[in-house]
Image (cartoon, grey):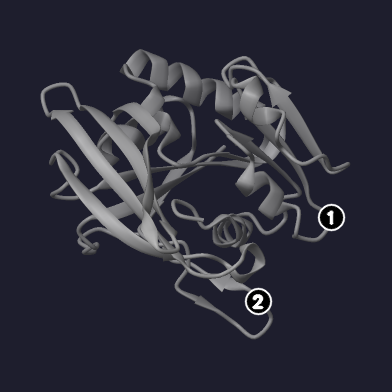
Amino acid sequence: IAVTNAAGLAAFFASLAPHARVLREDFSGTAALARAWLALPNARAIAVDIDRSVTRRIPASENITVVTSDARRCTLTCDVLAATNFACGYLHTREQLLAYLRHARRCLKPKGLFICDMYAGSSAFVADEQRVVTRVPPAFGSGTFVYIWEQRSVDITTGMVHNAIHFELPRPKRTPLVIKDAFTYHWRIWSPAELRDAMLEAGFKRVDIYDRIGDAIDQHGRMYTHPLGEGDEIDDPAVLYFAARK
């Protein structure tokens, strides 16, 4: 709810690969994206995560295969392979990044699509804190809570950052419940040029970069998207999506 729009991402990926049926979500956590993909016609999904305490909480479905494994060892094939929520940041060296990208390409069916994201902009290497008031979706109740994104430390010489997510939950007639360090991350921030070059070196034929998940949706529910072109300006900060075609 606070950090990802799974339904929007699923529609975005479907617009980039309209004939895709099987999506694989690496570094899936609770498989929000994989589960959202199942809303599409004739869709199947694969959710891969190394943490059994997380994968065992994924709701059972006959159309989703849950794999508890290092994503770099899973060989199940798919039409779309997604590594979102800045998952490539877990790969701290270029050697690790290239090895994963080559593995991802091997797991794609012919004309398959690999997608990952990364944040960019002038604040990418700034230690700061952002507080966002988030509304609870109607399906889960009502009210709001505070989502706090903290970039705790940065090293611009290596691209490494330490980040954390905290929450403040309201309580009637009491001080808010603070959940400190609900999630923590030790990431390498890859620049757009570094990611694109690594994807091409890994064997992908073409890499398109998007600065938003959709420009418009028509009356039939089709999403229209346009990749960035040379000289295009983007928001600052921005989350960029890299779509690499096999």
Nearest to the observer: residue 246 or residue 119 = 119
The image position of residue 186, as x and y in percent, is 32, 25
Asked which quadrant contains residue 47, the reply is top right
Mark 1 and mark 2 in contact (Cβ < 8 Å)? no
Nearest to the observer: residue 204 or residue 95 = 95
Task: Please name the residue shown 59% across and 17% down the image.
Answer: 70
Q: Is residue 66 above or below residue 172?
A: above
Asked which quadrant contains residue 198, the reply is top left
Q: Is residue 130 above or below residue 98?
A: below
Mark 1: which amino acid? Asn
The image position of residue 22, as x and y in percent, is 74, 43
Local crowd at mark 1 within 10 Å, few (<14), some, or many (≥20)?
few
The mark that comes first in sequence, 2 or 1, is 1
Nearest to the observer: residue 227 or residue 176 = 176
As measured in the structure, the alpha-carbon distance from the residue carrying label 2 to the one carrying label 1 is 16 Å
Task: Please name the residue shown 64% across and 17% down the image.
Answer: 69
Mark 2: which secondary structure? loop
Give the labeled residue for mark 1: 42
Mark 2: which amino acid? Gly
Mark 1: which secondary structure? loop
Q: Is residue 18 left or right of residue 224?
A: right
The image position of residue 20, as x and y in percent, is 71, 50
Give the labeled residue for mark 2: 221
Asked if residue 76 shows in the view, the reply is: no
Q: Is residue 190 left or right of residue 21?
A: left
Q: In the orientation shown, which residue stands out farthest toward the bottom?
A: 219
Q: In the orientation shown, which residue stands out farthest toward the right?
A: 62
Asked if residue 124 shows in the view, the reply is: yes
Q: In the orientation shown, which residue stands out farthest toward the front?
A: 173
Q: Is residue 41 above or below residue 43?
A: below
